[in-house]
Image (cartoon, grey):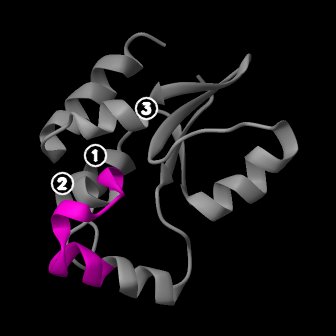
């Protein structure tokens, strides 16, 4: 595996970030980005997550939905549901953790455990 690509189900930009933060506080049950929900508090990245991702033994890339579509989907025709984690391999992009799998994750520790376990398979 060359790289893990984490794609949030949110668009980039300061206004979008502000709206997402408000949404998480006002109506968290309807918030649509489980990756954001698990890895960020209402404003900043959770320390446990930041430490974990900074110490991964693989290159990582974190993108918002619109950034991913601009960089990858338009060039290669990839169509995915977000949030998602993709593994970039010699064969191309492979789903590492799907949107449906994200919906079953209850907390950050579970997400970290899943990533560690799956990385052992690559």
Sequence order check: which comes first, mark 2 or mark 3?
A: 2
Residue name at image x 47 percent, y 38 percent: 85
Q: Is residue 120 above or below residue 6?
A: above
* Main secondary structure of the magenta stretch: helix
- Residue 5, image x, y percentages: 55, 42
How many numbered circles does the render carry? 3
Dot 1, how many residues are within 10 Å of its Cα: few (below 14), some (14-19), or many (20+)?
few
Cα distance in 3D space between marks 2 and 3: 22 Å
Q: Nearer the viewer, residue 59 or 70?
A: 70
Verify CB contact (< 8 Å) between mark 3 and mark 1.
no
- Residue 79, image x, y percentages: 67, 38
What's the mark number on residue 52? 1
Cα distance in 3D space between marks 2 and 1: 6 Å
What's the mark number on residue 33? none
Q: Is residue 39 magenta?
A: no
- Residue highlighted by disc 2: 48
Q: Is residue 30 magenta?
A: yes
Q: Which residues are magenta?
A: 21-35
Q: Is residue 117 above or below residue 81?
A: above
Residue name at image x 48 percent, y 81 percent: 16
Which quarter of the rendering shows the N terminus?
A: top right
- Residue highlighted by disc 3: 98
């Amino acid at each position: 595996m060359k790289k893990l690509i984490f794609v949030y189900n949110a668009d980039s930009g300061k206004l979008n970030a502000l709206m997402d933060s408000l949404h998480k506080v006002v109506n968290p049950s309807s918030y649509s980005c489980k990756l954001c929900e698990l890895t960020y508090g209402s404003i900043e990245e959770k320390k446990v997550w930041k430490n974990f991702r900074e110490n991964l033994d693989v290159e990582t890339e974190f993108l918002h939905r619109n950034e991913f579509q601009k960089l990858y989907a338009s060039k290669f025709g990839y169509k995915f549901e977000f949030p998602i984690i993709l593994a970039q391999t010699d064969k191309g992009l492979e789903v590492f953790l799907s949107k449906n799998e994200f919906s079953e994750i209850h907390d950050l520790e579970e997400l970290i455990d899943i990533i560690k376990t799956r990385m052992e398979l690559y």
